Amino acid sequence: MSIFDYPRINFKGLISINVGTANNDDYSNDLFVPNSPYAPGQPVRLADSASVQPETYGMDDATWLKWAVTPLVVTTVDPPVDPCANMIKKDEGLRQVAANSTETIIPGEWNFYGDMGLDMQKVGITGINDPNNVIPASLKSTIQSSQLSFLNRTGDNGRSTGMVIDINPEDPTNTQVFTDALSLISGDTVIFMGKPTKAMTRWINMFRNGNLTGPNGAAAMFQCVLPLSALNGQPILQGMPQKSPTGQALAGIVVRYNFYRPLQIVNKYNYQGQAWIDKMVQVYANKGTNSDYLQIQGTIAPWFEGDATSQTTGRYLEPQTFPWPIGWKGNRLGAPQMQIPPAILYYRNYDQFRQIPGQISIDLSAVLPDMYQGNYDPMVTGNNPKFDLGQLYLAIGNPANLQDPNTLILGQINYMDVKANDANGWVFDFTWNAFINAKINNNEPFFLYCSGPMGIDQAIHIEKPLFLFSETSGVYAEQNTVNPNATTTQFRDYGPGTVPISFIGYKNGQKLTNNGGYTYDLWYYDTTPNQAPGKAIPLQQGYTLGSPINLPVSKKGNVLITCTTRDNPPPACYGHFNPLTGSIINVRVLPNDEDYSQYYKDPNSPQPTGNDKLTWDVVYSKVLRNYYLLYPAMSQVLPLNNPDIWEDPAMTRALMGRISLDLWNTATAMPRTRDLSASRRKLLTAWCLKLVTP
């Protein structure tokens, strides 16, 4: 039931995302000017993402680092007409520059010194839905005064361990949230603190705000769980039911949350044109950061055996396209009509024999757009009301006609009251009745219908029986250059070991244990940054849900895998792929196309020791230079280019520990970007062993 069970503990606040931007590739549609000393007429790029190496254009390190934060005049060009050559970018704010002219940019973009950190700020409890009074009164009072965070301990020694890590630095559908701890703390009282599962982007939504454009108008949903093993003896368990209404045993707690309204301190609304360039030059003069500050809203609820881990599940209400509402000033991205994220509805029939009450609940937390009314100060909240789409109704019956006598309207949704809906987590509950069950038995769909003066008079969501997704929706693979037809079924997700990946399905809100009468096919797109995204390529016909996926890995880079029914193949090219409705697994295939055997005493050893050829210059140029240049935050404490530091045996041992796969899913792992391939990990470890082995 995901977040539909009681009790529901709802929260809201701010979260800072200190992402590094050097590898965002937002300026690759711009060209170096014809008289440039670097690469005249070529795209402006800082990184070769597939090879995990910087593009230095012949500059030494010091020159490159200065160049990355210095204003640069570039030539603008029109984006390709071919939709297969376009991909959503992550550039902050608006860029309204005519093609074939010039503009001034900063190559390192808007947060060059970001360290990938996540930090919740004053994320407090907005309301508790506990109709059965499961939570003891004293615990409920403590929860109401608590704050959610990524802190790993209470008090002044606690630090935020959250990290945001993109599998594909160019594509916004694949952000991962890693953290050592997710904590609910009131003063010195820990209500819960434990390591959650990885959370992954769901439903990247470029149409979240009717008054913000670019990525500032975007949003995404995430979900993770803390299993019982991470919560033993903690107070939160006193407020959780031991079984669900249908008898599943408690397995932990689930946390579903949304990020939205991203703004930076130095943003392109308050600092326009040259003023933005000048301000960023000031920030970078002191190696300062310009983090994104987003609103975060979510729900904590019991998690039961059999529930999904990374995705809210139930009956799937698929979003429909509808006319742009009157007054919309947000993103349109060239789309003729608007579309918002899916809605998930939970329905349970009344069971008189087992005394199980009926329930109808719908999660609209990720669905309804906002209308920002602030002055672009990211630290100020309370100025982001809902966009008025008109009257919104939940109904079952005929989606084409709300007034059809056979349509049963379950109720109007009062979504404009932000405070009240923050208190209920944007999960709306409706009264069950037997007429609904009769319509379900007649295969009539639930739907959301919008009408009124805003130009919309139609169903904006209609229930679709089948819902496909993956619990392993963002993973890493290793390139295999031995065989040009090499494939793998093993991927790194959230631990030192590898796992298979698959898609699963729900039909009418119930998890499928077979294919549910459908025939499925797998497809993939090449989404490697710095190139045109690829066309849809068949991967497997006749796929069985839940079975391991076998992916070609002879080529390094990124791919996106999607699963479709045979009668509904994906778009021919990725430029038309819809991340709101398409099933997604993002894979980064890490590069192993360079032979380092000449640097090993025994090349056949699983983990060799370096020989005399394996010098500091080798490991720096092959591995460490990438992180020194593209992620300078890593060198704020200890410079990655200084051999005097890293050749010290104590530091060498520390480095060897930090790059170990045992630390893969922790805040202390190096590199934070998780893009160190197996061959480069072996090379760096071999160098460490050479220095520390007698």
Image (spheres, rainbow, N blue to C red):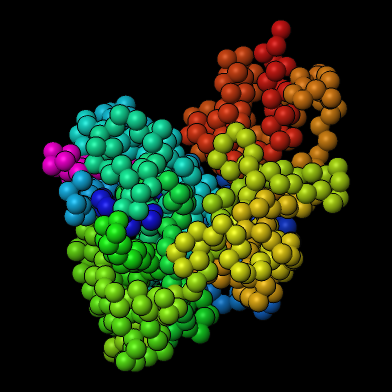
Q: Is residue 331 visible?
A: no
The question of residue 140 being in magenta is answered with yes
Say which quadrant the N terminus sits in.
Answer: bottom left
Residue 421, can we see it? yes
* Range of residues picked out in magenta: 135-149
Residue at the extreme front of the image, as rendered: 353
Residue at left 29%, top 82%? 409
Q: Is residue 25 above or below residue 347?
A: above
Q: Position of residue 410 (x, y in %)?
A: 27, 77
From this view, report whether residue 313 is shown above or below residue 399.
Answer: above
- Residue 413: image quadrant is bottom left
Depicted 404 relative to depicted 658: above or below: below
Image quarter of the C terminus: top right
Residue 593 percent coordinates (x, y): 80, 43
Q: Viewed as shown, does residue 244 lie left or right of 613? A: left
x then y, percent, for residue 568:
63, 75
Residue 344 is left or right of residue 421, and the answer is: right
